[in-house]
Image (cartoon, rainbow, N blue to C red):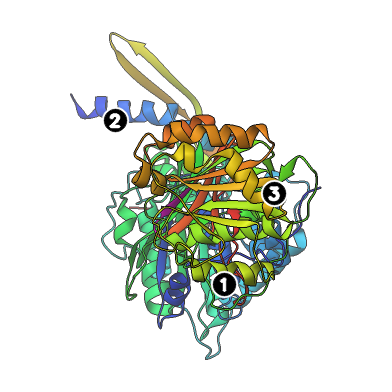
Amino acid sequence: MEPTSAPKNCQGKVPPILLDFMRAPGGHSLVVKGDAGTGKTTLALQTIEEMEAEQPNYYLSTRVSDEALFRQFPWVREQKMRDNVLKAGKTFLQRNKELAAMEDAHPQVTVAAAKELLRALNRTDDSLMVVRTELHKLEGQIEAGELTEDGEEGFQGDLMSEGEITFDLGIMLPELEVGYDMVETNLPAKTLIVVDSIDALSERYGIQAQRLVNTLQKDLVENSATNIVYTLEKSGKTDMDYLGDGVIQMLSEDRQGRRIRQLSIEKLRGQAVERWKYYFTLNGGRMTVFDPTWVHIPEQMRPMPTVPITDELTVSSGNESMDQYFGRIPRGSLVLWEFGLDVHQDVVRCLELAVMSDVLQNGRGVAWLPMYATDYGLVERQVRMLTGMENLPALRILDTQGGSAGQYDMVKTMEGEEVSQDLRWSEMRYMMEGAGASSPYLSILGYDAMEAIYGSGVFRDSLEHIDAMRRGGHVVIAIASSRSASLDALRQQAKLHIRFEDMAGCVMAAGMKPNTPYLYLDFNGPEDRLPVPKLVPMI
Amino acid sequence: MDGSGSRDDELSRLIADDYAGKILTATYRNPMSVQQISRTCNIPIAVAYRRVAKMEEFSLVKCVGYEEVYRGKKVSYYQCAVNVAKITFSSGRFNVEVDPLPESEMVHVGEPSAERT
């Protein structure tokens, strides 16, 4: 069954600076350019939706039929925008009526819109009127056959006196005239017009897009304080870049088979643009731009709810969203979490704390060799808060520095000579059994830290521990940076491989094994809980 | 190249033009405004005006009258003015012969059109 609306918690979000741009005094034009499928229409529709309470709107769609639009963006129907869409559609119905080709036309809409048009044209009172100088000039040029196909115009001014003008009234450029009428009806309120797309309108009229934009810019944007968004079916530098007050480039590119969606602000006259590049998703038919990742682990945290155990063959990552996208961790497997160098340490720490807390609360044992130097006292406090356990006998932190010997019960100091000795399976089993931990056990090994102590060949020497854990049906999570000397071997051995990377300040995860789209880590959540990311696919 | 050769070339190009062909067919004994032509023949409005102007210049269509539609605004009607058109290729060049539709077969609409300069 097709979805009829976006979930309440997935209403989307466009870059706030675009809305500020539309709200600034006066009229503004915004060119949204990009290839097919880059999200231009979604951005335009969502801008209308978010400005709906402040600015009446007119959506002029030329490429797709209304029903097709509703199918593609079911939420449009819910946002009471249908009337506006049909107003644009009525102009096509008028044409098609004469062709007698449309059986499912909406005559009542056509009639209503025509009445509205005539009402505007008949108006003789003192109400505010929109400037139509350029529109009339354009119509005059069209009628005189003076707009050539390549855009070179011989027209130098008014060629005909008023008495000689011959107009086919009101329907020469019907979509534009409805737009002008809407703006006039709404004056002095500012109207938001979306022309989707200016190329298609240009093709429909046989008039260069630049000429149409110039006409609208002078009449509506500059003289009637109207906001106009044009979508443009082109990428890169275009002539239109100079005509709009703002220019947005939408990009959709492939990175190793994964889609990357980007919105770049090339120009936004009058706005101080601090952030010019946004990654976003079109999940649920909505644009949601991703905020830069900012993780803060609170000083006081409530216990973490455990992830329900669904079966005895798998273990949770401590994060239901990660389990959903990457699958739960099979017992007897090596998992690789690869982190880009720019990913903040607190991101790694949040993931580590989540999985450890979940495992410990299920009565299982954890051996943890941290990726980064760690304040063990802080970790002990955090794990106690997250698990709600006063004692943590089943947690063993493997310390390679030696400075904390004897200070904390849970810290076991490693000799730092041979990793195969320090990670002896018999030792591990003895520790876990002594703590009364049940299996499966979990080892979390920070390979960059291990390489710093044991040398770059540490993976080979740690394989004995990994193999023993796998044979026993336990789980090893290897954490390595993208520069780790052990990375290639870990990738080859790992059953699950997730890569975390920073994109313009946004932390994304991508499943290498299994292959997944890029997933944004949304850390928004209650302030008194460990930030556990919800994953949002970039689709 | 003499002027008539160039005019013949332009005329032959015009007659061979897809849009011009549609306009001739649609307006044969059936006067239409340019906007009706645009809608009926599915020709972009600016292109329709341009073609009709060019075709009128070559006497392929003729303005057969106008109607006042609103507060002095007028709409002109055009009709195909061609009875037979032949394009022949001989001795390395194209020749165009246009046999105009007799005046008696033109359908007049509303008020007669003013002479255009």
Above or below — where is A431 with respect to A267?
above
Q: Callout 2: few (<14), some (14-19), or many (20+) C-alpha neighbours within 10 Å?
A: few
Q: Who's the residue at 47% across and 78% down the image?
A: A130
Number of residue marks: 3
- How much space separates mark 1 and mark 3, taking CA atoms? 23 Å
Disc 3 element: helix
Disc 2 element: helix
Q: Callout 1: few (<14), some (14-19), or many (20+) C-alpha neighbours within 10 Å?
A: some
What chain does mark 2 sit on?
A: B
Q: Earlier in the sequence, mark 1 or mark 3?
A: 1
Q: Do the residues marked 1 and 3 share a common chain?
A: yes
Residue A474 is labelled as none
Above or below — where is A3 with respect to A292?
above
Disc 1 element: helix
Q: Which amino acid does label 1 sit on?
A: Arg
- How much space separates mark 1 and mark 2, taking CA atoms? 94 Å
What chain does mark 3 sit on?
A: A
Find residue A467 and report its horizontal and vertical position in percent.
Answer: 58, 32
Residue B7 is labelled as 2
User: Which is more toward the observer, B105 or A269?
Assistant: A269
Q: Name the residue under label 1.
A: A381
Find residue A458 and report its horizontal and vertical position in percent.
Answer: 41, 37
Q: Which amino acid does label 2 sit on?
A: Arg
Q: Who's the residue at 32% across and 30% down the image?
A: B10
Q: What residue type is labelled 3?
A: Glu
Q: Give the range drawn in magenta.
A: A500-504
Is A380 included in the stretch rendered in magenta?
A: no
Q: Do the residues marked 1 and 2 share a common chain?
A: no
Q: Do the residues marked 2 and 3 share a common chain?
A: no
